[in-house]
Every structure is written in structure tokens, then in C-alpha cells.
Image: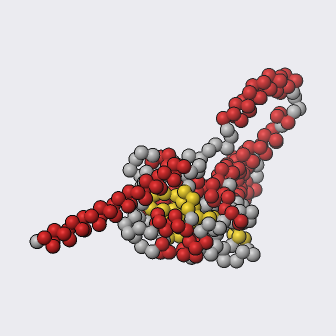
Amino acid sequence: MGRGCAIALALVLFFLAIAIGEDDRVSDLLRRQAGSKDGIIELDDTGIRHLAASANRPYALLVFFDAHHLRERSGLKLDELRGEFSLLARSYIKNNAGGSGESKIFFCALEFQRAQASFAMFGVNALPHARFLAPGSGPLNASESMMELNDMVRSAEGMAAYVESKIRHKVGAIDRPPLVSRNQLLLVAAAAIVAAPYVLKKLLIEGKDTPFHNSKLWCVGALLVYFFSVAGGMHNIIRKMPLFMPDRNDPSKIVAFYQGSGMQLGAEGFAVGFLYTVVGLVVAFITHVLVRIKNKTTHRAILLVGMGVCFLAVRWVVALDHWKTGYEIHGYLPRGWL
């Protein structure tokens, strides 16, 4: 009886020591996170082993592998990816401060010069690279590569979707800073207010043949705005998306269309925007020009050609969307037609 009580007491003390050790690790991570300027905890070989090699780790780690001497290689875009990773970390910390998710996941970085042994242990031989270490135990090199599993995610939003799928906890809204700061916006507004009387006088009173009175110029401007909108121009600017990227299997080739919903290259948006613009121009021609043609034969021939062009353009857009995302669009007939 006494021997059984001793074993039970030893087990209780053992698990209590483990729990205290894990609490110390969580406190250490929270302290380092609070002292970080961008929400990312910088680790070395000793730090990653201490924080990750745990018998029952209650938190997850998302590790970004970096190399300062490779930052100048524009093709890797390490600065851009580190910025998106930092944006994800800051947003998660802000949205989960004081809540149950505060200590569920921590965002870390390993720099090559300080953690060469860790690069070798994780089997990282190419950048960019990021690893997800799930809660619990297990060998570190058995962790998942986020970049490969999530189609080379390059935005904070894409990384957030990956994290949410792994920890079953909401990251929250990505707090992306605006393109124009508050002071810049105030400066532009002040300049517009000062210049407004002079501009209105020139346009409304003195102006007759100015560019602002040219209908063709307004038409071209409207088309450019429409193309910029449907081609995802603002998306490319905000997320700094490249027009194309090198092929991962053959760096001598370029990839303009990336298969996978995690990322959209600029060339994809421009291609779809061009097709949308073609359809818009055809519809505008039919509704404003074709109706003035009195010859019925010519009228019908042009109408059929326009319908064919619109059909092909929409079909290409649907085919591209299916190739990229796997989503299928099925045609159907209303029940009243059957």
C-alpha cells in the first residue's frame, strides 16, 4: 500500500513539474513577444530547441526561416515575405490579446547565421521557407512546411487562412496599414481646397476646349479605370504582387499563371481584366452604335460576331477559374423550359 502511494505521488510530482515547465515556456514566449518590435520572436539554435522540444507542448510555433545575406536577391522577396509574416503576427497578437488564443500560437524567426544547425535539422536548403510546429510532442523535422502545403502563400491573409486551418482558432482581421497616411491625406485635402476656386474658374468660366471638355479623353479614362478595377490593380499594389515569378522547377522559365487559390499573380489579373474589358466594349458597341445601323443583314452579322466574342471571353475566364481553384460552373435550364 505504501509503495503504491509513493508511485502515485511520484507521478503527480512528475506531471506537476512538466506543467510548471510548460508555464515557464509560455511566460518566456509572452515576454519575448512583448519585447519584439514586430511581434516575431527571434530565436537561435538553443532557443528553438528549448521552446520546441517539449514532451507536451501546449502551444504551436510558426517559424519563418530568414537569411540576411540573401535579402538583396529580389527573386526571393525575403523582405516582402518577412513584412507579411510580421503583419500576420501583429494582427494575431492584437486580435487575441487577453483572450484564450493569446498563447495558442507564437510567431518566430530563425536567421541562418545564428541558427545553421536548426536549418540543417529542419532540412531547409532553399528559401523562402516557413514551418508549422503543432502543439504536442514529436520530432522537429516532422513539422509541416507552410510554403509547400499552402501554394507558396505570400500574403498575410493567405498565411492567416493556413493558421486557422491548423489551430482551429480565428486569427482575426489583418490590420494592414493604409497606403496613404493621415498626414498625407490631410495635405492633399488642403491642397485641393486651396486650388479648387482657381480650377473651377478655369474650367467653368474660361475653359472651352480644355482636356476636361474632351469627351474622347473622358471615354479613354473611364476605360482605364474600368480595366484597372476588374484586373485587380489595387490588389496588386496593396499586396505588392509580382507580374510573374520564376518557375520553381526551372528558374530559367517564368510563371505568369499560378495554379492555386493561395496567390494571384499580376499577369492573371491583367488577362482576366482584358477579357472583361473586351466584353464591356462589345456590349457598349451593340447598345450605342449597332442600333444605328439600318441594314438588317449587317446588323445581324455584327450582332452574331459580338455574341461569339463575348461567349469566348467568358468561357476563357470560367476555364481559368476552374484551372486555378478547381471550382466548376455548371449550366442548367429553368424548369419552365423543360
Which residue appears at 25% of the width and 68% of the height? 11
- Pinpoint residue 20: horizontal percent, then vertical percent: 35, 59
Residue at figure coordinates x 85%, y 36% from the top left: 211
Tell me which corner region of the image, top left, top right, bottom left or bottom right, holds residue 79: bottom right
Q: Position of residue 199 (x, y in %)?
A: 82, 27
Residue 280 in view here = no
- The residue under the point 43% across, 59% down is 25
Q: Nearer the viewer, residue 193 or 59?
A: 59
- For the N terminus, give its image quadrant: bottom left
Residue 224 in sight:
yes
Closer to the camera in the image, 158 or 261: 158
Residue at image position (50%, 75%) is 141
Total marks placed:
0
- Judged left or right of residue 27, residue 37 is right
Q: Is residue 243 or residue 130 the one in the foreground? A: 130
Q: Image check: 263 left or right of 227?
A: left
Across and down, in percent, residue 328 comes to 52, 65
Q: Is residue 191 left or right of residue 122?
A: right
In this rendered view, identify the residue nearer to me: 9 or 29.
9
**Residue 111 sits in which quadrant?**
bottom right
- What colouring style does the render use? secondary structure
